[in-house]
Amino acid sequence: MALVVQKFGGTSVADPERIKAVADHIARTVRDGNEVVIVVSAMGRTTDDLIRLAGEVASPRPGRELDMLLTAGERISMALLCMALGDREVASISLTGSQAGIITDSAHGKAKIVEVKANRIRDALRAGKVAVVAGFQGVSGSHDVTTLGRGGSDTTAVALAAELGADCCEIYTDVPGVFSADPQVVPDARRISRLSFEEMLEIAASGGRVLALRSVELARNHGVPLEVRSSFTWEPGTIIDKESAEMEQAIVSAVTSDASEAKVTVTGVPDKPGIAASLFRALADRSVNVDMIVQNTSTEGATDISFTVPKDDLDESLEVAMSLAPVIGAGSVRSDSEIARVSIVGAGMKTNPGVSATMFEVLARAGINIEMISTSSIRLSCVVKESEMERAVQALHKELGLG
Ligand code: ASP
Ligand code: MG
């Protein structure tokens, strides 16, 4: 008997027909002799609709009441799913994040799980029931309802799988797995059958939207194997697990892109110790998540520093940089929000020289200018104009032979 955690995303439970299809699948999993824990997202675009609704009465800011509102979405799905399971004579119980023992810190809108007290889930399993847990939510030490950030149901599923020692954690969505590029941009993108946690982390961090980044970090830290699958076709999907010797190491597995960041450039920065420290400390103190950083070599004692931040944090970053510029003796502060980051990811990059040269050549042949470059051992990213992003992805996918 295996213990299986299955997470169903918003599109998988978008309407009554979808909920019934999911209930059928859960019933099959139970009848195959498994213990089953389910995590659900809100139906379809419910979370977006609730945020919009909040915007009609006030300007919605992360906080207690917004979290209270948003957590209602997942409650609807979990209750409806349990009713559908009841119809199929599958015993189940719905649990809110709080009832399921998901204890978080109190950072509303982006709470982190600090502990999972899964007693009620264990009780349910012992009683032969399916536990259906509302994803994306928890409760803080001061008993307030919290949310984990957009896409947070994946994180709920992985946290429960880790705590319960589940044999696997299946993430059901509307695509049959992780692809070598976004199939809407690259029609001949392929489904990848296996990825290492490291590759999936880089894919999630560089714009691949199939899994929330934090859920992959959590899965890696706890060694929880994941499988991303389609709840529309139920076919085998993409398995994400520890890197193993027999795993085929593609030099490049995927091309990703991300247009969610903006670039800030501080010019004429004095080239002396402590300047970068004070700039990035000030940004960190305002919880701005800085991604890429490039500093030029200095000419005549001054240099330029460029960095990227989420577009949502641009105003705040500009405020910080502008108020700091006179203090550190910098020249001007500029920004550009029409940028995009295009990345290639692959575990085999570690041991294969020349991948960066190839990437730059492909972009050069396509006449696409590179504004910034950053690398990790298994990822290469280039910032280009947002208007050239799709063309860059298509050219790289084709020329790297990923189709
Ligand atoms: N319903 C939440 C969202 O749309 C959480 C999730 O789907 O994972 O972000
Ligand atoms: Mg969602």
Image: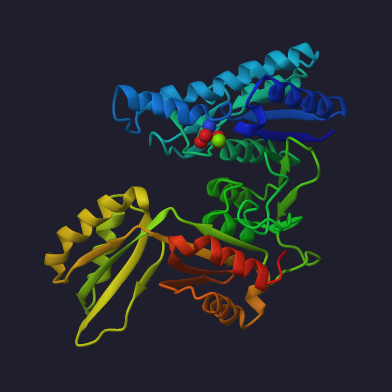
Question: Residue 200: x, y in percent?
Answer: 62, 56
Apparent side of residue 297 relative to residue 40 in the rendered image (left or right): left
Question: Can residue 96 be seen in the rendering of this structure?
Answer: no
Q: Going 74% across and 17% down the picture, which residue do you hit?
A: 85
Question: Residue 52: x, y in percent?
Answer: 40, 28
Question: Residue 83: x, y in percent?
Answer: 69, 13
Apparent side of residue 273 relative to residue 239 in the rendered image (left or right): left
Quadrant hosting ligand 2: top right
Question: Can residue 227 be seen in the rendering of this structure?
Answer: yes
Say above or below: 188 vs 363.
above
Q: Going 63% across and 33% down the picture, which residue do you hit?
A: 11
- The image quadrant where one finds the N terminus is top right
Say above or below: 390 vs 274.
above
Tell me the quarter of the picture where residue 191 sits.
bottom right
Apparent side of residue 24 relative to residue 260 in the rendered image (left or right): right
Q: Residue furthest right?
A: 32
